Amino acid sequence: MTMDKLYPSLPFASGETPLSWAARLAALHTGGGLRPFLNDMDVPFMPLASGHADAIRRLCELAGQDHNVVGHNTIRSLDGRRFELRGEVFSKDFMTGRVTRFCPACLVEDEGGAIRPHVQRRGRLEWLLAPVRVCPRHQQPLMERQRDAWDGKARELQLLVPETGADLQALAEPLRVLKPSPLQDYVLGRLQGAKGPDWLDAQGIEQAVRATEMLGAVLRYGVDAKAGEMGQMDWDEAGRAGWPYMSAGEKGVGEALDLFLADAQNRGDGPLRRATTYGMLYSWLATSKLSKDPGPIRDILREHILDNMDVQAGRLLLGEIGVKPRRSSIASLATSEFVNDVTLKNVLHAKGVISDSEAALPGSHVLVDYETGKGVADEINRAVAVTVLPQVLNTSRPIVAALMDEGLLPQLHDGGLKVGKISCAVDREHVDALLHRIQKYASPVAEAPRTMVSLAKSAEISRKKMQLVLALVFGGRLKRVMRLENEPGLDGLLVDPLEVKSLTPRCRPGMSASCAFMMLGVGATAGKRLLSEPGGRVLLKAVKLPGEEEAWVTPAAMACFRSRYVTLRSLMIELKCTKSQLKRRLDAHEVKPAFDPRSFGGTLYRRADLPKSMEI
């Protein structure tokens, strides 16, 4: 059959698809099926089914129809599995696939008692969209038909829905009344150009729908629900459940995730697991085979997990590699930081980071702030037992005891580590600093000069306590300090006992002010401020010895200062972090320096201003 124009004309109906119109043209002009008609009209079926512009234009020219009107209702195939409709791009999963949906009540109205019903019955564009499961006009669930793949492409109602008249009416009568879901209304409105919630409008239409349904599925059916076991009306219910939260934006999604978390905690099944807390929502977003960007819901869930669940450093988390944890279980921290989990838990308990009830639980059940826990783990790893200090420093036990009494090696238990195997230990940072000072300030010699002797011999000759000798050496008051090149540590130190004897009558436990400033990590300007009553009172008490130019700081004064204040450098050492990392943490808690750093000459914080998680 060949002709320039088809007659009589059959206008394209509002809301129908190009294939539906072509099938009605076939029924009108040949009384037969779609494919033979298209072959006769020299209109290729597959390009027409794919929304190709040339095929649409060819059919419109034959039927005398404006191709722009038809094009407005055309889903165009792009590359791969992507499609486009009215500026919205989505995948094949956003459509019904091989299944053809229809509303029998709509088809009854289309027929209107006509002698040739298939000329009147129209396949609606909205029936091709997976989120549309309820007829907006008749408020009934859509029915589905499927034969083979070819019929799924043609969607020819004459073949798929042969019922007409009373038989078709009989299909519609038993269907329950069901209002369309808000999610379905949103999809159809968006395709008509209507504005919706800003947060959803900023996403792809498929992203918004899929996230709403997956969130709603867990809300409606629980964490044990599986996507493969859900029917179409189950998904409709899921969309209804998820809409109130998704339409409220990020805050609403966060509220839904909080409900999941509270439910998991109330179940009391042990440590929180992601799959049993967030159900199929997590399974979907965590799959390595996720071919499409799920949108911002993945970022929101990742943040929720970081805030509330055990996360191990360096692991992949919802598509992001190397995520820095915020919370971690004691067991995970112990594993990643190579410390004993029981020791770590005991130390955290001693520091007040965890409660008595948490201390009684297994480490895998207790979550702590990651930075706080890691800082404590670092302290444990840096802990050097007092019993091995003689070997580390290459000296005797009495000299180690004197170093600790003098405050040159403060014990870690002052910060809460007086438990277990590290009940008596010092921080390796202080040990390394002490050894570094020996290397820096003592002149190396191959052999001991005749007038120079070891620390122990010097105390014996001068008849002075070892604490006083050490105070002279590390307080910088001795002019002659040497070290044997082949003897590391303190046993290699050499001093002049006559010089020691001449100075010790005026010596006392402690150190010079300059040495104290060095140990605290402040410069000379800030150090002077510590001694000169900033704000009306002295921060670091020091005394003037007769005949000495420099003030003297006692161990008690240092301990008192450290209990109330901490310098920027000392806080970095305590928390084992960089300056930028420390600044971010302090800013997050709105912690300000005790004094203006510019006028003070350094940065000093009050211990009382630090949050509990940062106290060491």
Image: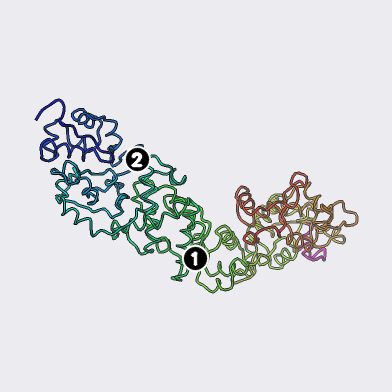
Q: Position of residue 354 (x, y in %)?
A: 58, 68
Type of secondary structure dominating the magenta stretch: helix
Q: x, y percentage for residue 561?
A: 76, 59
Q: Nearer the viewer, residue 261 or 460?
A: 261
Is residue 442 shown to the viewer in this render?
no
Which residue is disc 1 drawn over?
331
Based on the displayed image, in which of its 4 quarters is residue 370 positioned?
A: bottom right
Residue ID for mark 2: 89
Of callouts 2 and 1, the N-terminal one: 2
Residue 206 percent location from the top left of the image: 36, 46
- Looking at the rendered structure, the kind of residue marked 1 is Ala
Residue sitting at x 57%, y 57%: 371
Coordinates of residue 42 in the picture (x, y in percent): 14, 30
Q: Quadrant of the C terminus?
A: bottom right
Which mark, by number, is residue 560?
Answer: none
Query: Label 2 vs label 1: CA separation?
Result: 46 Å
The residue tagged with tag 2: helix, strand or loop?
strand
- At x 31% / y 44%, what residue is drawn? 91
* Disc nearest the viewer among 2 and 1: 2
Q: Is residue 35 above or below residue 7?
A: below
Closer to the camera in the image, 562 or 157 = 157
For the residues bearing labels 2 and 1, Cβ distance under 8 angstroms: no
Q: For the point 64% across and 57% down, which residue is it? A: 574
Q: Is residue 311 magenta?
A: no
Instruction: Return the residue found at the far left.
Output: 1
The magenta segment is 457-472
Q: Please state, as top left, top right, bottom left or bottom right, where the N terminus lies in the image.
A: top left
Amino acid type, mark 2: Val
Q: Residue furthest top?
A: 4
State the image quarter where residue 48 is shown.
Answer: top left
In the displayed structure, does residue 23 sit left or right of residue 304?
Answer: left
